[in-house]
Amino acid sequence: MTTAITRLYADADTAGDIARQLTREGIKPGAVTVVTADGRKRAALVEALKTAGVHESAVAGYAERLAGGAAALVAKVSHKPLGAAKLVRTIAARADAVALENVTEEFTCEEKTKMTTDNIMKDHRHIFLNAPVKAEPAGEFSARFGWPLLQDTPRKKNVYEGDNFMSASFWPTPLVKDTPRKDNLCPRDAAPKSAAFWKAPLLKDSPRQSNVIPGDFLPFSQTFGFATISRRP
């Protein structure tokens, strides 16, 4: 947003001096305008004041006094530099301004950016081109280079044609058989699998002894004559 501050001075010299002080203090020269009659009639003065940015409530009074030799100062500032509006008020008060009743001499407005050479990107790659650069039409990236990504050919029902399995090309025997499955891999009446390589039976049906150590339940040490306790006098 831009703050517009206007003041009416008795002559053009006073308004011009205030304008020069503003630019010396950091206000951009393009933001300060001095409007004088310069031989223009009332209608032209009104238009010039509106173009400069004077509030509509002050245009008629300013135009009337400009015709008598007065001059209008218009300063449009934003937040750069910091405190610019306060600086304009302070410098504008260094000279006596013509007071008008029921007019607005400070207000906020939307200032359109003026196209100047400062707005041009001088390092842009198209800065020296005479013909304007046209944007390319929207579309697929592959279409610009003629690369077909999709084909409209009909899809095959099966990737592998024919009735043969893929394994038949390198393995002569079928991988899957349709023979019925047996109820049990090891029939009950069949010999144990160990009988093919171990002739002796792995299990015996003989009755189990009541004690692993034969004898009348003597200790293991007594069976072999081991003395487990040494008795010394």
Image: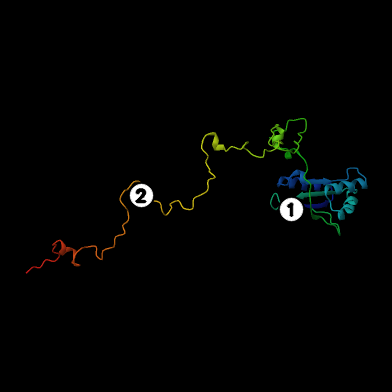
Q: Nearer the viewer, residue 50 or 21?
A: 50
Q: Residue at 35% x, 49% y: name it.
A: 195
Instruction: Specify the farthest residue to the left.
Output: 233
Residue 163 location, x and y as percent? 61, 38
Distance in Å between CA atoms under marks 2 and 1? 107 Å
Residue 61 lies in quadrant = bottom right
Q: Residue at 55% x, 34% y: name it.
A: 169
Q: Residue at 77% x, 46% y: name it.
A: 31
Q: Nearer the viewer, residue 153 or 135?
A: 153
Colouring method of the image: rainbow
Q: Nearer the viewer, residue 192 or 230?
A: 192
Q: Which residue is mark 1?
A: 85
Mark before the other along the chain sequence, 2 or 1: 1
Q: Nearer the viewer, mark 2 or mark 1?
A: 2
Residue 158 lies in quadrant = top right
For the residue labelled by badge 1, is the local secondary structure a helix, a strand or a loop?
helix
Residue 177 in the image: above or below residue 1 = above
Q: Nearer the viewer, residue 127 or 136?
A: 136
Q: Which residue is mark 2?
A: 194
Left or right: residue 27 versus residue 201 is right
Instruction: Specify the farthest residue to the bottom.
Output: 233
Left or right: residue 182 versus residue 55 is left
Residue 232 location, x and y as percent? 8, 68
